[in-house]
Amino acid sequence: MAKTDDEMYSQSMQRFLDLANSMKDEGVEPRLVSAGLMSASAIYGTYVFAGNEGRMTPAGVDKMTEAYRQQLDQVQLAKQEKQGTS
């Protein structure tokens, strides 16, 4: 049976988290792991939307920035709900 987009999303996210944790366990400071992940995501996101040789317009950058903000909001909301606080 083919995996759904949600399943592939969750598995991809978990692979990145596993890699980040293994880098941390190898002695790379978490802030550097995070910065590397963010840079890689920006490079890959640019590739997805503009191709290998292209670049995003300012409006495209704004859309990608808003997508990051929405992800951060979702993560913070999930943490808040897990802690049982508002």
Image (cartoon, helix red, strand yellow):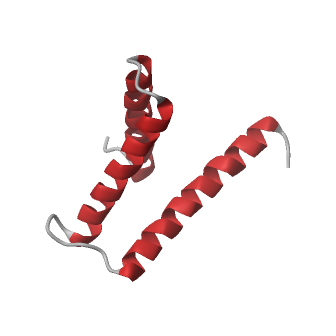
Image coordinates for residue 4, horizontal then vertical, percent: 39, 49
Image coordinates for residue 85, horizontal then vertical, percent: 85, 43
Location of the N terminus by quadrant is: top left
Frontmost residue, 71 versus 3? 71
Q: In which quarter of the image is residue 56?
A: bottom left
Image coordinates for residue 40, horizontal then vertical, percent: 32, 49
Q: Residue at x 70, y 41 (%)?
A: 79
Q: Which residue is drawn at 32% across and 80% down?
A: 57
Q: Which residue is drawn at 24% across and 63% down?
A: 47
Q: Is residue 64 left or right of residue 79?
A: left
Tell me if residue 17 comes above or below residue 41 in the rendering. above
Q: In which quarter of the image is residue 46?
A: bottom left
Tell me if residue 71 comes above or below residue 23 in the rendering. below
Task: Count every numbered label the image shows and give the total.
Answer: 0
Image coordinates for residue 83, horizontal then vertical, percent: 79, 36
Q: In this view, does 54 lie to the left or right of 78?
A: left
